[in-house]
Amino acid sequence: MAHIIGGVATTHVPSIGKAIAENKQADPYWKPFFQGFDYVHYWLAREKPDIAVVFYNDHGLNFFLDKLPTLAVGAAKEYRNEDEGWGIPVARALEGDPDLSWHIINTLVADEFDITMCQDMLVDHSVTIPMALMWPGARRHPVRIVPVSINTVQHPLPSLKRCLNLGRSVGRAIDSYSKNVRVMIVGTGGLSHQLDGKRAGFINKEFDKLCMDRLSAEPEALIGYSIHDLVEEAGAQGVEFLNWMAMRGALTGQVTEVHRNYHIPISNTAAATVVLENREISTRKAA
Ligand code: DHB
Ligand code: FE
């Protein structure tokens, strides 16, 4: 039976890729952010995931404004990255897990989520930066991935409630997966940031803290925020928090926040990293 070990959420600002390429992790600007990954590395080494289900948002590499699915699931053997124009190295291809992908897709459609199924899919910085942060220097990442893309780019966007429920459906799919694999869930992006317009550079520390506080213990307490509330409170691109909500939804057991790092700013973004541990209910009963 598959096990859901927990979740990692992290900012995916492209300039992180440049800092990695230039070995700037210890520079005063970058250190407070990269240091926040020491615990993540310890946790991953201890928990040894086989597969990562990654909730992220494509920024125009695979989907553009002409055809943009609200929700899409990768079902490919391999996911390539390409030059997005940020001046960062193109990441090596990531290995997929088509079998788990199709199991998740079957569950999602049965649960009435109308997703787009992608047997060919490029992944952008929103996937590759978190992978590089979690496994720095890895020639080959030790996990296979199932990417799940949520539209945070072109309105109308899915609600926080829908993303939480999407995650829950993915979590149920993993719980019912017969292979003995250890699965981690990743949510990327956020926290508060706005890249353009009159409020470019907008950051809301209080709201970010509220979101992180509620995420582990009472995610339902956040679903009262509409997408427009979220834009107002977190900034136009702060809506990437939808990916964090989906990640949280997929943790079907008892959830505890075991690590948090919050640092302002990286680029125009409030940079945050969180690790949530998932204790499976059935394991607890058996113990
Ligand atoms: C930045 C943040 C993002 O989430 C992104 O996708 C691109 C840029 C930034 O803060 O610069
Ligand atoms: Fe982004």
Image (spheres, grey):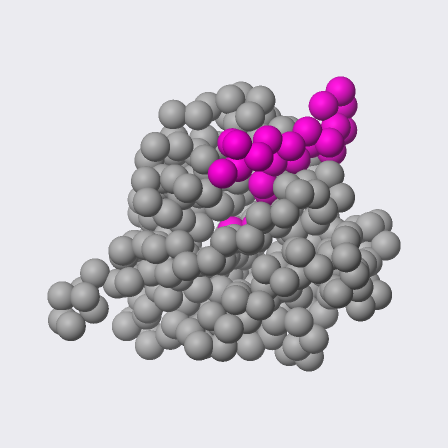
Above or below residue 16? Residue 203 is above
The reply to whether the magenta stretch includes residue 110 is no
Is residue 58 visible from the viewing direction of this image? Answer: yes
Residue 17 location (% of width, % of height)? 75, 59
Is residue 60 visible from the viewing direction of this image? Answer: no
Residue at point 38%, 30% (across, down): 223
Residue placed farthest to the front in the image? 28
- Residue range of the region highlighted in magenta in the rendering: 187-209
Where residue 215 sits, quadrant-wise, is top left
The reply to whether the magenta stretch includes residue 189 is yes
Residue at point 46%, 43% (across, down): 212
Where residue 24 sits, quadrant-wise, is bottom right
Residue at point 55%, 26% (across, down): 233
Q: Is residue 139 left or right of residue 181?
A: right
Q: Main secondary structure of the magenta part?
A: loop
Q: Is residue 145 left or right of residue 93?
A: left
